[in-house]
Amino acid sequence: MAAVGVAGLLLFGVAMVMRRLLAPVSANPVRLTTYESGVDPVGSHWAQTQVRYLGFAFLYVIFAVDAVYLFPWATVLRDADLGAASLAEMGIFIAVLLVGLVHAARRGLLRWLP
Amino acid sequence: MSTLAALAATTDNPVADFGDTPWWLSLVKALLVFVFLLINTLLVIWFERRVIGRMQQRPGPNRAGPFGLLQTLADGVKLALKEDIVPKAADKIMFWAAPAIAGAMAFVSFAIIPMGGTVWMFGHKTPLQLTDTPIATLLVLAVAGVGVYGIVLAGWSSGSTYPLLGGLRSSAQVISYEIAMGLALVAVFLYAGSMSTSQIVFAQNDLWYIVPAFFSFVVYVITMVGETNRLPFDLAEGEGELTGGFHTEYSSLKFAMFFLGEYVNMFTVSALATTLFLGGPAAPPGIAAIGDGMLNGGWWGLLWFVVKLWLFMFFFVWLRGSLPRVRYDQFMRLGWKVLIPTTLVWVVMVAFIRAAELGFLGDSKVSLLGRDFPRATLFIIACIALAVLVAAWFYDNHQVKRRAELEEARAMDEEIDPFAGGHPVPPLPGQRLVEPPLALSAARPAPVTDSGSEENRG
Amino acid sequence: MTVGGAESALFWIAGPLAVAGALALLFARKAVHAAVGMATAMIVLGIFYIAQQAEFLGVIQIFVYSGAVMMLFLFVIMLIGVDSSDSLVETIRGQRWAGLLLAAGLAAITIAGIGKAAFGTPRGLAEANKDGNVSGAARLIFGDYVWAFEATSALLITAALGAMLLAHRERLTPKATQADWSRERIRSGENVAGLPAPGVYARHNAVDTPALLPDGSPAELSISRVLRARGQVGTTGALTQVTQEIEHEVGDESDEQATTRKDDDA
């Protein structure tokens, strides 16, 4: 596993060395400016972005934690002692989360357009 | 289906036995996986351009090598010969790190994919799989989560507006669809009782999970397109809106890294779909029966695996050739309002089906089509079908009512002839156009007369 | 306790990486570098868990912490700005002292709690992972700690409401459409055709350069008010100079233009 990842990094290293050997370099101040479809860039690049992304990131965290509980549950369901009980437990858990999601949707958090 | 319950083991440990695999053999296998992915990527880019060419009635690349097979290689060499530009406004360290993360992370997940049965390799009996753990499938999700950093950092470090927007979009997109993907996988885990890929493949001996977990398969296929930023969900690099998205400022081999990462990711998600829903390296049902399973397992598995993998690749290409890009708000609405809630409900349904199979809800069985089904399973499936039907009926009624309302509203509008004044005039609010009757017949494509000479046009 | 060669090698390679990431979190000057440093530390910790055969915990660590929480960090950074430095002004009087006091209290409780912990005899990995690592963890979650698990759902739903409070504003009035804006312009009688667009010239094309009015003076309205507030408005002096020089030579220059040129030069 790690070996494949390391191989990927090595590939990147080899590619970078190859580029250094093969690719031409001609520094040109105009070429190094930010690309904005032919319009000259003004000021620094950074502009504030939509706060909506933040809402979705929050929801992601919530549902990631939810998924984290679902995964082990999938393996415990076959258990003779806990299986039936865990089914009810997980039913309550998912119902509570769904209520949350439906509430968020009704209040318009999930609507991308304002 | 009840035999499934018997097959699902009481442990979630992998069934693949790595006992006879020395460390050097693991390294060899790692290298082979890496080379396999590289070659496949080279092939698939050519394949994509040729197939899309066919779909658009043009030949596609056919000059470099036989059938243009070497076109991708030529493009790669060309990229290496391009000047590498680091914009002045860029954050140098992250600008370098981003393509490295995107390129390297793409390869990692493939380590847990079972690509064939158990084979003899250099005098050792070893499974055609690099490694397996009880959490192998989750590893793919975790690695995908880390891979997003490549895109976000690329967008941020470029010091430019288009990449920043593209990076943000892409990360929001990937995390939204990762949730739906994870939830879709839960149904498979419920059936298999394990997250180890070899165990899941083993549990599909009897029936591929595409049948009992059909809805999960549909959701997974949708999310895998969203995860890999491919058309119709390639909003992160929507050319019409963001020029190139997160890789606008990248050039030369750094750009090639993103390109490579995207295609390898496509292979990874397809391989996971193959493993989870199509029985991995298992032979297709009819062929598996030939000669007491002689075409099933061993090196043959690799063949079936590659065939299934490329079916998914063709599906990716087909999508790209036929669908337009969706709007971002539509995309997010699909993810959060449709995929996630329905998949959550589906997971609960599957849990009840499983509980019925395991005998939590009564033990009586019914024989059907040569299989034993617990009565409770059939009852739950009937309940689900009924619920779906009722929901569909309500939805349909609602649609009919809405359409009727729309029609009524339209009927109130005054009809105008757009050409009344001699030149076309758009309708004002409260007016509607009289469609010229010729529009439809004029829009019909002219019959193709000459298709034989296309190959020669280049 | 003995540690295998491969594991100690992993420790000596990955350990420093985790420490470097943690130090980057403390000392990096750019907020994004700090966040990436923390992500590195989290991922390496996850790898350590996996190396110690707590595979489920390790993967969850990477999935949740580096995947979700760090993404949240990055988003926050993007929203509040990359260049902005922290404001050290106290908005609520005494909040710093109150914060320190609460932190000290939390630390005291934590230390007291951990100090009292009694260790049972370890049963060993073989028994814990008998049915597989995930099943072992799952049995604890859904068996012994089921109330904590159900309480988590309440916590999560609270978090969802918090997200809504932070990142969502409800509209009390419908959003003005393009048609509404147009009607409003015509009713007020100002800029009926919309505001003028910024300058587009053969040699220079930027949003920070104002358009020129027929008399050659810059049209202030064509510049976005954000740029004006930031003080990033460019000058048109160099652009109009050439034209004016030619006009001067052919004797076509009006008095107004002459004064504008003087203004621009100054």
Image: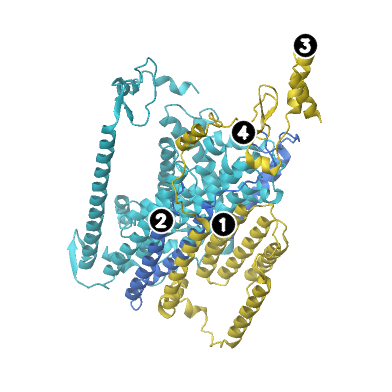
* Image position of B92 with respect to C164: above or below: above
> Residue under circle 1?
B146
Q: Is residue C199 visible?
A: yes
Q: Amino acid at mark 3?
A: Val
Question: Between B414 and C73, which is closer to the camera in this rendering?
Answer: B414
* Image position of C114 with respect to B201: above or below: below
SS assignment at label 2: helix
Question: Between B449 and B165, which is closer to the camera in this rendering?
Answer: B165
* Image position of A83 with respect to A5: above or below: below
Q: Earlier in the sequence, mark 2 or mark 4?
A: 4
Residue at 46% x, 48% y: name it. A112
Q: For the residue carrying disc 3, how many other residues have a C-alpha within 10 Å: few (<14), some (14-19), or many (20+)?
A: few
Which of label 3 and label 1 is nearer to you?
3
- The shade of chain B is cyan
The yellow-tinted chain is: C
| Pointer 3 with pointer 4, Cβ within 8 A | no
Distance, label 3 to label 1, CA atoms, is 67 Å
> Residue under circle 3?
C250
Protein chain holding label 4: A
| Pointer 4 with pointer 1, Cβ within 8 A | no
Which mark is drawn over residue A105? 2
> Residue under circle 4?
A37
Q: For the residue carrying disc 1, how many other residues have a C-alpha within 10 Å: few (<14), some (14-19), or many (20+)?
A: many
Which of label 4 and label 1 is nearer to you?
4
The residue lying furthest to the top in this view is C250
> Percent from the top left, x then y, of residue A4?
58, 55
> Percent from the top left, x then y, of residue A91?
35, 68
